[in-house]
Amino acid sequence: MRVRDMTAGSPAKLLLVTALPLMLGNMFQQMYTVADAAVVGRGVGMAALAALGSSDWFNWMWIAIAQGFAQGFSIPVAQAFGAKDYPELRRTVGNATVLSAALAVLIALAAQLSVLPALRLLDTPLEIRPTAIQYLRVLFAGLPIVMAYNLMAGILRAFGDSRSPLMAMVMASVLNIALDVLFVVALPFGVRGAAAATLIAQAFTCVYCFTRLRSLPFMRLNRVDFQPKARLERALVKLGLPVSLQNCVVAIGGMLLQRVANPLGVVFIAGYTATNKLYGLLEVAAVSYGFAISTYTGQNIGARAPERVRKGLRAGLWIGAITAVLIGLCMFLFGRNIIGLFIEAGPDAERAKDIACEYLYIMSAGLPILYVLHVVRSMLQGMGDTFNPMLSGVAEFFMRTGSALLLPQRIGYKGIFLAEVLAWAGADIVLVSAYLRAKGKLRTMEMEKA
């Protein structure tokens, strides 16, 4: 396995070389969701697709809480790797593993207990509520698997290894699609079969990433590395908790948006869900650039090379803007054909597709705003600042919920669609302001280095 030192060389080239495998890996990871939705929507029916979508944000909230802690825990790993302090790196990984195991159990338990109250609060239509419950119960049982994968993938990315998570996702996606067809089509297990297929595929990624980490000589952890260190645990929680809270706040805003959408009926929910399933593919490059620039920033902060951090941000913003425009154009040209993969033929199919396309076109036009969000937020996190990214999540919450509550009264259901783009814009205002303040810290580091 190859690790990558990002403290020397062209920032743009390093970001692209690191991000492209991550992009492919994240794209295959999104195939979990797309495959579930396509197989369920066409194999079981529009009502089943609506059941999956009626609780999308609630499902994502618990996954994102786990991801947030894992992402925060990887920041000091990248910094220790950049500083070539391998004993500290091993202690950090050991303590992060112990914390993650405890958190995974608590998160899974809390998610299971919240299923019924959440679906009632979301006003999920009664005719699809039992199906949504079945799907969520299975998925939430596998949250420890989600936590384990994200921790190990985050550590690999901190070392500049984006190929191993890619290979894990390619193989897992193929496995997931095959199991979807087996469990949903050949064996009529319905939505529970789709959820089980996802968990089995995710378990495979855990095994693969674990074997890759074990192959690294500097990752041979001893029992002493797992002994709790108060200093390390405080530092890990200080970094991981704000990222997790940021994701949670964003998800709660999305749930309130879903609460506004659910009473509009099964046809609207199906169309809304079809586009939401593509959301992950729209932002897959943004997420990948974010992971790359977080690792890049963390390593260069550890190596005390602040001038490279600023160059990396400029390169990331240009690359992100060009990518966002290209993806948006593809969605305007081919979006309706892609939407058709999710919705079976029927009397309401065209109406559901129309709704999905309206939402897709609005999001596609706003993609440059989303890509700025991911690049700047990840750069700040790589510097060790997880507080301002958390504030950006609060800004997203207020923009998303305020727009969802006010705009539909004036312009109809399109207000629900616009709320997403306005939420991204609100987050950007906070993040860009935070970066302008962070430039002072970088200049101070440059002066101290000189």
Image (spheres, rainbow, N blue to C red):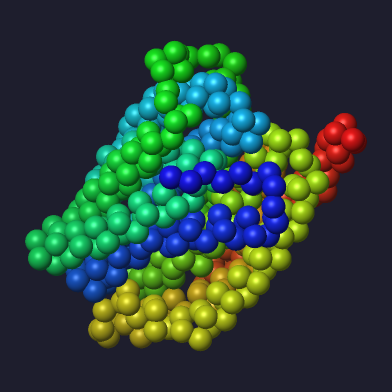
Q: Residue at x 57, y 22 (%)?
A: 88
Q: Residue at x 71, y 66 (%)?
A: 318
Q: Position of residue 225 (x, y in %)?
A: 46, 18
Q: Residue at x 49, y 56 (%)?
A: 22
Q: Is residue 98 left or right of residue 251?
A: left
Q: Is residue 326 left or right of residue 360?
A: right
Task: Work out whether 210 lies above or below 24.
Answer: above
Q: Position of residue 321 (x, y in %)?
A: 67, 68
Q: Quadrant of residue 266?
A: bottom left
Q: Is residue 323 left or right of residue 66?
A: right
Q: Relative to the observer, which residue lies in front, 333 or 156?
A: 156
Q: Quadrant of residue 36?
A: bottom left
Q: Relative to the observer, which residue lies in front, 244 or 28?
A: 28
User: Could you tell me if residue 430 is visible in this image?
Assistant: no
Q: Residue at x 63, y 55 (%)?
A: 14
User: Could you tell me if residue 368 is visible in this image?
Assistant: yes
